[in-house]
Image (cartoon, rainbow, N blue to C red):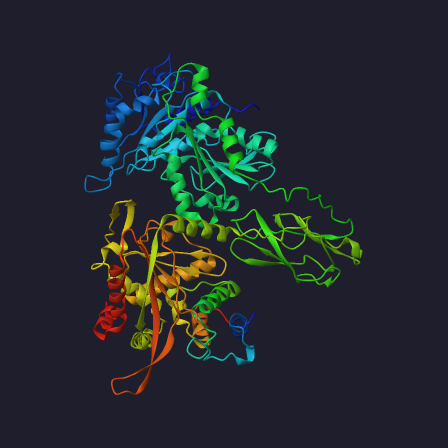
Amino acid sequence: MTAPRVAETLNHGLHSLFSRDEQLYLLGEDLLDPYGGAFKVTKGLSTEYPDRVLATPLSEGGLIGVAGGLALCGNKVIAEIMFGDFAALGFDQVLNFASKSVSMYGRRVPMPLVVRCPVGGNRGYGPTHSQSLQKHFVGIPNLVLYELSPFHNPEELLDHALNRGVPGVLFEDKVLYTRRAFRDGSVDDTFGYELVGDAPGWAHVTGPTTGDVVIIAPGGVAHRALEAAASLGKDHSIAAEVLVPGQLYPLDLDPVLPVLRAAGRIAVVEEGTAGGTWGAEVATQIYDRMWSDLTQPVLRLSSADSIIPTATHLEQSVLLDAATIRAAIADVTTVDPGPPGAPPVDPPADGTPITTPKLNNNDTTYMLVEWMRAEGDWVEAQDPVVALETSKAIEEVLAPEAGYLHQVVPVGEEREVGAVLGHLLPSPAQPQEAPKPAPRDNVRPEQRRLDKAQRGTAAVVTRSHREIPAAYTVVKAEVGEALRRLEELSDQTGATVDLVDLLVKAIASAHPDFPLMFGSLSDDETVALASVPNVGVTLDTGQALYVPVVEAAGDRSVSDIADVLMDFRMKAFRGEFAARELAGGNITLSINTDPDVLLVVPIVLSPQVCMVSLAGVYPECRLDDGGAVVQRRCVNIGLSYDHRVINGRDAVQFLTQVKTFLEDEEALSRLLSD
Amino acid sequence: MTSVESLVADVLGIAAEDVTEQTGAATTSAWTSLRHVQLLALVEKTYGTRLSPREARSCRSVGELRQALAAKGVTS
């Protein structure tokens, strides 16, 4: 049976809603029979329900205002804007009346109002009848934004929106009206879908393979995203999935986070123009929720920065299309086929392959760093057999079953997930089949590509050295008393507090007297001063270097700082950092406290203007006032600073104050009692 | 189930028989702040549990670590 067109499902849904609810009204322009609305979506309604389907004058502000008033009086109301472009004329009623009425009268007032807005181009209607204005409605308190899609049942969508107690705007891409709705989980011979999450939920469209990239597309762009996904699979061997939300805003990412995390590459596409878009909001939430899972920035695609021409060929050159989506994703998505010239490896018929497992969501390839058993060795099932390096760690791969090991991939080479690394054979392989390193230039020494984490570090330090003329000063601080007091506090509270925690507090406490140290360069002549000291702290797990930020460190107790830093350390090992935890620092502390580390010269993280360093504690003997030899415990505290902003004298004064905070008993008491 | 002693021994690089309830930062130089966090991350993974920052700071010895796990119903 042929699926109905989307306009038919919408019309059927409206009829069903009107038959079920005598309090439901529909207001709009030219929607009475026999015309039945500009897109015939309301056809038949005015004949069946003449008292509740009301034609209005050509005033969007007026009709939305009346609709809001009806809703305020206990009715449910749908307001139809003939072309969504004219929602601009009713925007004041949406922004300042309907949405605010919910919560500005001292109690919560239901506002069951949905404004339907046909939007979008590709119909040759020209600049003022083709726009997609969704972005202008994003972020209004109490206002929920929906978008019609070929996957979501419009009756259920409207029913849901009318029963939430807050007003909503339903955007309906006009091109969808004549397309067939998708039903029963099938899109075509290649793609299927399922609805995930609570209503209205998301449509999750998948093809024969998944996992390379996810395209997030509102309903109006869904067909273009599907076409692009099909082409990416066919022409580029890129497995693309598509996610279509029924509700645009507020956005509920929870139901689709596993899908997004599994892919790590995400594109958000929309027909509106760039700048303050819904897609930017989606990207921001993705960064906040799954920063560490992303393998590249979220790709955002919009229509061209232009009015929408009427001439079809010019309109097509402006509006986002499937080819643009495909090309942009193909440009940034590489599915590694293995090293050039490497022959395909066919597993022996009588062997069990050892394949590259998916070890994380960050990487598409891993480097083989060690065969843990020799060629021809007998290996038991579940024995560690090969070590792979990810961007975060070295992971051991276990033998899937027992057998004689036959190595295929040599040490030092990268392979994608699923690639065959070796085989487990029932009898030892012939010696000549042992793997040889890939052909290399005989003259050049062996080369090794830096892992991803180190490449990221390289980019940061290179920028620092290229842009910042840094100087360095170091002071020695006697910390015996500080360490004793920290041990005392640790025993009192039953939880470790250490010198790093105290130093973060000491640095932050110097902020009032040394605001320049917490500044950031706006341009060559201007420093923006920070209102509160946010202290970044370097954490090196051995696999990755993080710089999470202790916000408002001056207002926190040392114990609180210790909790925050411990939380950061655990997150570093779990790989759980959110983007916001790694941003916003205005000074940084580099920690290198291993025994015998005397001096650490850090870089300066642009746009910050200095970085403090802490080396290891070391004993020192000196003569006391009576000439007797006494031992004390010291650390060297360094400061790298941007000499364009800070001079040596400032650096010494700043370090001296920090040193005093750690040495002076009264200052110590103040810091530890805050 | 892997014992806490063997996890501590693995992370600190010491013999399992040298691990006692008192083994901790105050008694063992190998128990550095980095090893402390490595140990707790391994404990979380091994026993399928999660420690709060304050709990992580309070595990200053093997005995205290065992107590923190017991409070979460984890037999170590």
Q: Is residue A403 visible?
A: yes
Going 51% across and 49% down the picture, which residue do you hit? A362
Query: Residue A152 vs residue A277: left or right?
Result: right
> Which residue sits furthest left?
A106
> In which image quadrant can residue A666 be found?
bottom left
Pick whichever, A438 or A299, lies toward us: A438
Query: Residue A427 vs residue A20: left or right?
Result: right
Pick whichever, A449 or A487, lies toward us: A449
Residue A116 placed where, x, y %? Answer: 35, 26
Vertical order, A292 against A168 (above or below): below
Going 27% across and 27% down the picture, which residue do you hit? A91
> In which image quadrant can residue A630 be found?
bottom left
Query: Residue A46 vs residue A66: left or right?
Result: right
Vertical order, A480 against A283 (above or below): below
Query: Residue A403 vs residue A415: left or right?
Result: right
The N terminus of chain A lies in which quarter of the figure?
top right
Pick whichever, A554 or A520, lies toward us: A520
The C terminus of chain A lies in which quarter of the figure?
bottom left
Residue A223 placed where, x, y %? Answer: 50, 27
> Which residue sits furthest front?
A443
Vertical order, A639 against A26 (above or below): below
